[in-house]
Image (cartoon, rainbow, N blue to C red):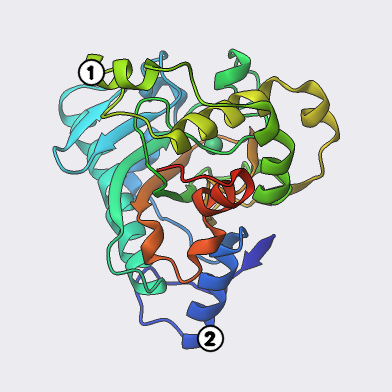
């Protein structure tokens, strides 16, 4: 479930054995853990380890690396530019590592985020509470079966980041797939037309969103389904397919995160992708 890798540099070349182990573990639904790979802040960036750099409305500050636009920070001017540069430096480092470690030809680099607010003690609706076990599914960005791969760094000086990691995706799907169905006819078409979503949701997106919500709303599942406590030490990183691995973030502050998207066809074992598992279980094409 947790595959610890002895990597201590951000760029390859990496050992062939390490690369093979990383690929197999990642696609099989393990979290790749890099305890010896700190993302180091510059002296001038230490001041950003402060919840007040967030605007107080969103949980995460996000950066679009293609436009350089940063959202949800309270900072302005020169300090905002330096924070954006820190997030960008992390995002490009994460992209370099993913490129050198994994054999995928094309991994799309999506948004980069900085999560400066302590996870514990915040209040949310159940659906948006990521302290509950869930798989990631984007409400506004249909994926059509494409994968969500996320690279995290704990940049807190002393606080660990605490996760729960749950049962394999197929067991989760067997439990929830029979309870969820397609959204009402026309809803995904309308959302696409109105621009609520970036394009129209596929049946896959509808099922993933419904399973995400049903899992969070099921108190019995949350309290009794098997899970493991995972502690990500300060100065460590981890990489995980969050559309496949059931996870809950229970505590921690000051994490950086880079999201990647990739096509199922790029995978060494495409049959392990959520879309292929759901298609097999439901007996129909979902994208
Ligand atoms: Fe998540």
Q: Is 146 situated above or below 265?
A: above
**In the figure, is residue 57 to the left or right of 80?**
right
Q: Which is nearer the eye, 71 or 241?
A: 241
Quadrant of the rendered image holding ligand 1: top right
**Numbered disc 2: secondary structure:** helix
Lateral position of residue 184 relative to residue 80, left or right:
right
Q: Residues within 10 Å of mark 2 (few under 14, many from 20)?
A: few
Query: Quadrant location of the C terminus?
Result: top left
Residue 34 seen in this snapshot? no
Residue 19 image position (x, y, % from top left):
48, 78
Q: Earlier in the sequence, mark 2 or mark 1?
A: 2
Where does residue 40 sit, x and y in percent of width and height? 40, 55
Pick the front one: 110 or 198: 198
Q: Mark 1 — residue?
A: 193
Question: Can the viewer see residue 23 in this picture?
Answer: yes
In this rendered view, identify the residue nearer to me: 212 or 185: 185
Dot label at residue 17: 2
Q: Is residue 97 left or right of residue 35?
A: left
If the image is split into quadrants, where does the N terminus sit? Answer: bottom right
């Amino acid at each position: 479930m947790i595959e610890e890798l002895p990597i201590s540099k951000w760029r390859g070349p990496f050992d062939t054995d390490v690369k093979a182990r990383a690929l197999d573990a990642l696609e099989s639904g393990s979290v790749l853990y890099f305890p010896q790979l700190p993302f180091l802040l510059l002296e001038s960036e230490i001041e950003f380890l402060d919840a007040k750099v967030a605007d107080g409305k969103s949980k995460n500050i996000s950066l679009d690396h293609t436009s350089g636009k940063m959202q949800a920070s309270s900072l302005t001017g020169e300090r905002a530019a330096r924070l954006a540069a820190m997030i960008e430096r992390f995002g490009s480092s994460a992209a370099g590592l993913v490129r050198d470690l994994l054999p995928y030809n094309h991994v799309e680099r999506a948004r980069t985020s900085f999560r400066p607010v302590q996870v514990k003690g915040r209040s949310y609706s159940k659906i948006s509470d990521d302290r509950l076990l869930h798989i990631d599914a984007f409400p506004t960005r249909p994926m059509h079966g494409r994968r969500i791969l996320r690279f995290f760094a704990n940049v807190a000086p002393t606080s660990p980041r605490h996760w729960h990691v749950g049962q394999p995706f197929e067991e989760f799907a067997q439990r929830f797939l029979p309870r969820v169905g397609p959204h009402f006819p026309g809803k995904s078409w309308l959302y696409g037309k109105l621009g609520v979503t970036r394009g129209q949701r596929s049946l896959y997106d509808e099922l993933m969103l419904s399973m995400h919500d049903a899992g969070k709303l099921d108190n019995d599942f949350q309290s009794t389904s098997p899970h493991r406590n995972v502690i990500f030490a300060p100065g460590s990183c981890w990489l995980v397919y969050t559309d496949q691995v059931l996870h809950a973030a229970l505590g921690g502050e000051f994490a950086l995160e880079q999201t990647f998207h990739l096509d199922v066809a790029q995978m060494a074992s495409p049959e392990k992708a959520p879309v292929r598992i759901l298609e097999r279980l439901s007996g129909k094409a979902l994208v």
